[in-house]
Image: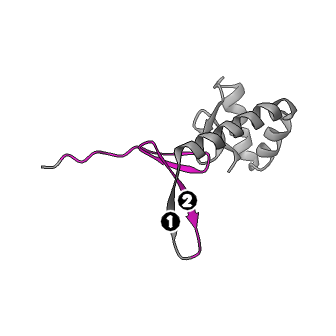
Amino acid sequence: MTNKKKSEITREFEFLKVDGRYFEIKNNKERVSYVEVPKKKVEQRIKLLKEVTSKMKDSLDKEAVLMEALSKLPYLELKQFYNALFRKKIKPKTRKHHCVDMKVGDLVLPIVS
C-alpha cells in the first residue's frame, strides 16, 4: 500500500491555500482554474488589508451592519435568533471562511458573503 499525504486546503482572503502555497481562483464561463501566487505577494496583501481594516474599524457602525443582516431574515428565523440569544443565553461567535457570518447556537447569520 502507498501512503498518500493528505493536503490541507483552506481559503484565506480570496486565496486558496494548499499546504502553505497560495492560489488565485480564476473563474470564466467555461472553467475554473487556479494560478499560484507568490507567498510574498499574498503576505503583502494581507498586511495591507490589516492596516486598512484597523484604520477603518473605528468608523464601522456595528449596529447598522447587524441590523441590515438581520432584516433580511424571515420573521420566524429572526424569532429563533431572539430565543437563542435571550432565552437559551447562547454567546454569538464571528466566523471567517468563505463569508463572514455569526453563529448563534445552531443558527448562522451571514454578514458578508
Q: Which amino acid type is marked by label 1?
A: Ser
User: If you read the primary sequence from the N terminus, does the residue marked by circle 2 or circle 1 appear first?
Assistant: 2
Determine which quarter of the picture holds residue 94.
top right
Residue beneath the point at 53% across and 49% down: 38
- Is residue 27 in the magenta section? yes
Question: Which residue bears the numbered disc 1?
Answer: 33
Determine which quarter of the picture holds residue 85.
top right
Determine which quarter of the picture holds residue 5.
top left
Contact (CB < 8 A) between labels 2 and 1? yes
Residue beneath the point at 66% across and 31% down: 84
Q: Which amino acid type is marked by label 2?
A: Ile
Residue beneath the point at 65% across and 43% down: 45
Q: What stretch is highlighted in magenta?
A: 3-29
Measured from the top left, where is residue 65 in percent x and y?
81, 40
Residue extending furthest toward the top:
89
Q: So how many labels did they put on this image? A: 2
Measured from the top left, where is residue 102 in percent x and y?
66, 37
Question: Which residue bears the numbered disc 2?
Answer: 25
Measured from the top left, where is residue 2 in percent x and y?
16, 49
Assign a secondary structure to mark 1.
strand
Picture disc at residue 22: none
Residue extending furthest toward the bottom:
30
Assign a secondary structure to mark 2.
strand
Q: Nearer the viewer, residue 72 or 33?
A: 33
On screen, residue 43 versus residue 51, left or right, reads left
> Mark 2, residues whose alpha carbon is within 10 Å: few (<14), some, or many (≥20)?
some
Residue beneath the point at 32% across and 45% down: 6
Q: Which of 38 and 50 is in front in this view?
A: 38
- Is residue 11 in the magenta section? yes
